[in-house]
Image: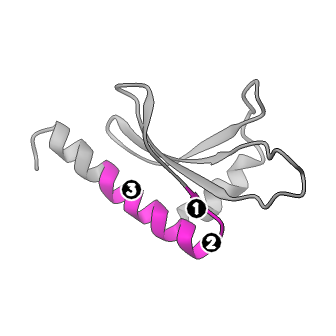
Amino acid sequence: MRLTRGYVALSHAPADSDGTRAVALAQFGKYEVRLIEFVPEKPSDPMPFWLELYSHETRSAIDIRRCYDLEAAVQTTEQLMSRARALDEESRGKA
């Protein structure tokens, strides 16, 4: 459900200077799972789902993955959310 809402929200998200758009799907402390839309090199290229695990502490991506179908994107979103949750718990000393 988060992925579907995120995909819809991308159409309303502001674009960066290079045309890239991103929306947060979930956040666990300093860690965020994002859905990203890059501008395709060719308009005829298939539009993959790009999912990113982002650290606000380091201001960088920890992991970024590309999926070409919804089922894979849902699984990847769940994996990244689980990892973000674990990293947050670890950083708080709960692991």
Give the quadrant of residue 22.
Answer: top right
The residue that appears at 75% across and 58% down in the rendered structure is 47
Residue 81: numbered disc: 3
Confirm or deny contact between disc 1 and disc 2 (CB under 8 A).
yes
Residue 3: numbered disc: 1
Give the quadrant of residue 60.
Answer: top left
Which one is nearer the viewer's eye here, 78 or 29?
78
**Which amino acid type is shown beneath numbered disc 1?**
Leu
Q: Which residue is mark 2?
A: 70
Classify mark 1: helix, strand or loop.
helix
How many residues crowd around disc 2 within 10 Å: few (fewer than 14), some, or many (20 or more)?
Answer: few
Distance, label 3 to label 1, CA atoms, is 11 Å
Give the left or right position of residue 49, taking residue 63 as reference: right
Q: Is residue 41 magenta?
A: no
Give the residues drawn in magenta, as a range: 66-84
Distance, label 1 to label 2, CA atoms, is 9 Å
**Which amino acid type is shown beneath numbered disc 2?**
Leu
